[in-house]
Amino acid sequence: MKFFVLFFLGALGLAFGAEVSGVDMIKSYSIIGAVVGLGVAACGGAIGMGNAAAAAITGTARNPGVGGKLLTTMFIAMAMIEAQVIYTLVFAIVAIYSNPFLA
């Protein structure tokens, strides 16, 4: 955890280190926000997918007769979880390339 905090503070130091205009600062903050947001979304999606797979495996182990239904439900849930990560990717791309805060 300390590594991530120090890495984030170092990235902020790089953003503040240069004497740049306000537009460049907005671009820097957009990139930092996109990277952090996408990282958090990817970690959350991975945890959610792991929990969904563990629950499906446990349910199949307890009742093998409903394994097919559990597998179908698990795939639908994983698609919904992955959609959230893809939405974050789209927002990150918008923030980096077509930032609405730039004039």
Image (cartoon, helix red, strand yellow):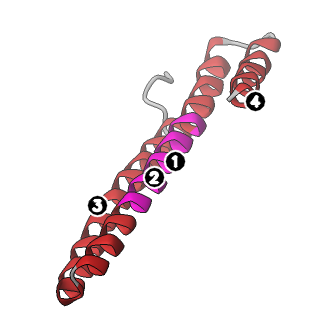
CB within 8 Å, label 2 to label 3: no
Q: Please, what is the three-letter code of the amino acid marked with disc 2?
A: Ile
Write the residue at 38% across / 58% down.
51
Q: CA distance from mark 1 to mark 2?
A: 6 Å
* Residue 5 shown left or right of residue 39 in the figure: right
Tell me the SS state at disc 1. Answer: helix
Q: Find residue 21 and report its image quarter.
A: top right
2 or 3: mark nearer the eye = 2
- Disc nearest the viewer among 4 and 3: 4
Answer left or right for 34 relative to 87. right
Residue at numbered disc 4: 3
Answer with mark 2 or mark 4, whichever residue precedes in sequence: 4
Q: Which region of the structure is painted magenta?
A: 35-51
Residue 34: image tag? none
Task: Looking at the image, tell me whether mark 2 or mark 3 is earlier in sequence order.
Answer: 2
Vertical placement of 63 versus 14: above or below? Answer: below
Q: Position of residue 14 (x, y in %)?
A: 79, 21
Q: Do the residues bearing badges 3 and 1 touch, measured as CB atoms within 8 Å? A: no
Up-down relation of residue 21 to residue 103 (above or below): above
Q: CA distance from mark 3 to mark 1?
A: 15 Å
Which callout, 4 or 3, points at the residue further toward the start of the chain?
Answer: 4
Where residue 1 sits, quadrant-wise, is top right
Residue 55 image point, x, y percent:
32, 65
**In the depicted view, which residue is nearer to us: 62 or 97?**
62
